[in-house]
Image (cartoon, rainbow, N blue to C red):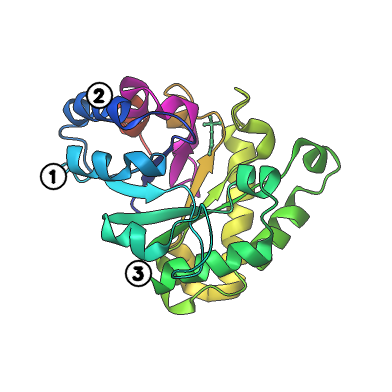
Amino acid sequence: MRRPIIAANWKMHKTPAETLAFAKEFAELIRGAEGVDIVIAPPYPALSELGRALAGTGVMLAAQNVHPEPAGAFTGEVSIGMLADIGCQYVIVGHSERRGLFGETDEFITAKLRAVQDGGLRPILCVGESLGEREAGRTFEVIAAQLEGSLARSDTARAEELVIAYEPVWAIGTGKTATPELAQEVHAFIRGRLAERWGGAAVQIRIQYGGSVKPESAPALMAQTDIDGGLVGGASLDPASFCAIIRYEDRVEK
Ligand code: PEP
């Protein structure tokens, strides 16, 4: 049985003071929420603040990015050791905004992913097709290539700790959520590729859906066989709406 994992990706939103205000309200709202892993990825300057504010709640910290090298002349970058030191447990790698806006290649992404694993943290690997790719009937081909490239150097021994986020680029920040059936089709495809690579371990790997997830859409998405959680952008910025997504089970029978 896979434990659901719901993660917030705040992108470039919230100062440390705003983070503190969020944490105060959120800690009250999620009291008693069980059976689901909750992860929040704020901007770097708010990571420590958030960790302190949510200590004892079970909420885990994620970074939105990292550099694969342990230290050195990489102006503007942050290392895995630095993230581990402040209690980070997850790192998002290969987000479509990193791929698209910052030119990150699968080669760079797989180096990061392996470094995250070697550093004892857990990667959340994002994959997803653009609208043009979907309309051209290339979704599975694109996802397969991203998985192959981004997982090229991944550690087989830590395969079960991996989290994959399927995020169709056309659904991110657009208000267009994939239908549960469409998302399930891609999630099943992803699990099939993971099984080809790692056999039985694929059953343990959690696959999140991301792309305009809202409290209203979460229950039907989460009811799908191969959807094990969500990676949530916009709707995670508000404590009440993020909490409502986390508490999707109050509104659905799986
Ligand atoms: C994301 O950034 O990973 C994301 C899914 O954003 P949104 O929920 O706003 O579409």
The reply to whether residue 251 is in sight is no
Q: From the viewer's side, name the closer residue of 243 and 65.
A: 65
Q: From the viewer's side, name the closer residue of 246 and 65.
A: 65
| 126 w.r.t. 200: above or below | above
Q: Residue sitting at 21 percent across and 25 percent down?
A: 29
Q: Where is residue 20 in the image (x, y as percent from the top left)?
A: 24, 29
Q: Where is residue 11 in the image (x, y as percent from the top left)?
A: 49, 36
Binning the other alpha carbons within 10 Å of mark 2 as few (below 14), some (14 to 19) or many (20 upward) gives some
Disc number for residue 21: 2
**Which residue is situated farthest in the bottom direction here?**
157
Q: How far is mark 2 from mark 3, CA to CA?
A: 30 Å
Identify residue for label 3: 120
Report the quarter where the C terminus lies. Answer: top left
Identify residue for label 1: 56
Q: From the viewer's side, name the closer residue of 124 and 24.
A: 24
Q: What stretch is highlighted in magenta?
A: 221-243
Binning the other alpha carbons within 10 Å of mark 1 as few (below 14), some (14 to 19) or many (20 upward) gives few
